[in-house]
Image: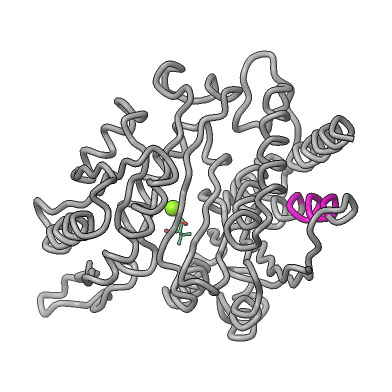
Amino acid sequence: MTHKLTLLPGDGIGPEIMAEVKKLIGWLESNNGPRFAITEDHIGGSAYDAYGAPLADETLEKCRTSDAIVMGSVGGPKWDGVDYNLRPEAGLLRLRKELDLFANLRPALVFDALVEASTLKPEIVKGLDILIVRELTGGVYFGEPRGIETLENGERRGFNTQTYTTSEIRRVGRVAFELARKRSNRVTSCEKGNVMESGKLWREEITALHAESYNDVELSHMYADNCAMQLLRNPSQFDVIVTDNLFGDILSDEAAMLTGSLGMLPSASLGAPGVPGLYEPVHGSAPDIAGQGKANPLATILSFSMALRYSLDESDWADAIEKAVQHVLESGIRTADIMADQTRQVSTSGMGDALIEALDTMKAKAA
Ligand code: IPM
Ligand code: MG
């Protein structure tokens, strides 16, 4: 069986980290692994430059008909002056919205070899394994009305709207409860119901859903600001965190740093059954280091591995890739972002090569 895969490298460091995913795909194909039919296209600023829009209709159709989509990153100062609806980020938001990819899974896992790379004390982060489930197609990212208007007194006023409906809250809540059952069976739901009606509704709906269908799962509620604090104070109290689009954006960057680097965190965005998943690193396009071979490709490689697991039914290969990542880290090979004493710094492609080498070694041992 051949998997239809769309690759969207995007902007900034996107192309160089995607090159390492392609290297890995090449290795899989020549080592009796899964086979892929690959389409590559533009998204973000590169799509704006090529097609005049950050996600062309043709690109969206290619994505819709593939089995999975792997994206690099979008954005950069080059497009700062572009209108909101044509900005690089708008391309990614459109892709998420059009495919209705409402559940964004962001696992923050601390590899033993990277305990020292975290800015937190080793005893706080060792063995950490959290899953943030971020609602991805609602909330203030998409709420109407939105805009910037000029008031009669000449002042300008910027406004956005946070909205959530019962069904939007419940469907992402269900994903969180289901995933918790396969993990440590605990869900923490985060909102700001103390100041926002949408947060109050969020808490009420999650509570009701829990009572109706998931009362075997341990549920707790937390205000999002407290959650941000608790993530630093005692992150291992969490198993699954479910939260809205904006809080999920912020809390997942924070959780990423617990793992040592934003360059380590993958994500999967899932919709209804049968809809292709979108797999992308949590980090952005890092224009300051783009093109220098400094970027860590592991978040994108681990995102590709999530695609194998969640969209392509190839979890054995996902396991192998994750194990290879672990071996590479244990052997002391590091990109700049996760450097520590007594480790060896490699470039973006050096990291990709090390991963291939680890896979070769694993294969030789298994033979
Ligand atoms: C993320 C990013 C995006 C977001 C940007 C690039 C639109 O920060 O995936 O976390 O805000 O969702
Ligand atoms: Mg973000």
Q: Residue 274, percent across and down?
A: 55, 74
Characterize the magenta stretch by its predominant secondary structure.
helix
Q: Residue at x 50, y 32 (%)?
A: 259
Side of 70 where 19 appears, left or right: right
Q: Residue 53, percent across and down?
A: 56, 80
Q: Quadrant of the N terminus?
A: bottom right
Relative to 143, residue 26 above or below: above
Q: Residue at x 77, y 42 (%)?
A: 352
Relative to 118, residue 95 above or below: below
Can residue 179 be seen by looking at this rendering?
Answer: yes
Q: Residue 144, percent across and down?
A: 25, 78
Q: Residue at x 69, y 14 (%)?
A: 342
Residue situated in front as seen by the camera: 200 or 352: 200
Q: Is residue 262 magenta?
A: no
Can residue 295 be seen by looking at this rendering?
Answer: no
Residue situated in front as seen by the camera: 342 or 238: 238
Side of 273 where 247 appears, left or right: left
Q: Is residue 22 magenta?
A: yes
Disc tally is 0
Q: How are the residues colored?
A: one colour
Magenta-highlighted residues: 20-28
Of the four image quadrants, the one with ligand 1 is bottom left
**Residue 340: which quarter of the image?**
top right
Q: Residue 117, percent across and down?
A: 54, 24
Relative to 301, residue 83 above or below: below
Q: Quadrant of the C terminus?
A: top right
**Residue 5: which quarter of the image?**
bottom right
Side of 171 where 363 appears, left or right: right
Q: Residue at x 39, y 21 (%)?
A: 124
View extreme (top): residue? 342
